[in-house]
Image (spheres, rainbow, N blue to C red):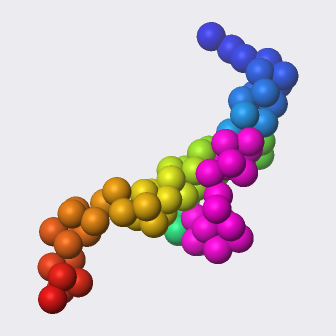
Amino acid sequence: MSYSERDVAGWSEAVANLHGNTAQGAGDVRRAYEAMANVWSAYGYQDAPTEVLRMLIDATEVGYMAALNDIRSGDLDGEITMWRPDLAE
């Protein structure tokens, strides 16, 4: 199965829009960028076309920023104290 450049451009735009809508500020974007830069550089997958790589990086950053949003809203409070009991002291 193959996809056209137009398909890839459409998916890339959708992911970029999701990225923009998930970020709650420049700090979130910076944290996600730094975290995912470390993940991607360790992984070493760099042979894909630039637009595909940008889409993959944006998509992983969306996940990171969504987790930041969950932490910010308190959705993970129980898990955080389980992972880091020192914070509950």
User: Would residue 38 be found to the left or right of residue 6 on screen?
Assistant: left
Give residue 78's position: percent from left, percent from top: 21, 63
Q: Check residue 76 for magenta coloring.
A: no
The residue that appears at 61% across and 68% down in the rendered structure is 28
Residue sitting at x 74%, y 42%: 17
For the C terminus, give its image quadrant: bottom left
The residue positioned farthest toward the top in the image shown: 1
Q: Is residue 45 above or below residue 6?
A: below
Residue 25 lies, in percent from the top left, at 68, 67
* Image quadrant containing the N terminus: top right
**Does residue 42 appear in this view?**
no
* Quadrant housing residue 31: bottom right
In the rendered structure, the answer to whether residue 4 lies left or right of residue 46 reads right
Front-most of 31 and 87?
87
SS assignment for the magenta stretch, majority: helix
Q: Is residue 28 visible?
A: yes
- Looking at the image, residue 1 lies above or below residue 79: above
Quarter of the image where one finds residue 18: top right
Q: Is residue 79 left or right of residue 27?
A: left
Q: Which residues are magenta?
A: 16-33
- Look at 45% across and 66% down and name the residue there: 72
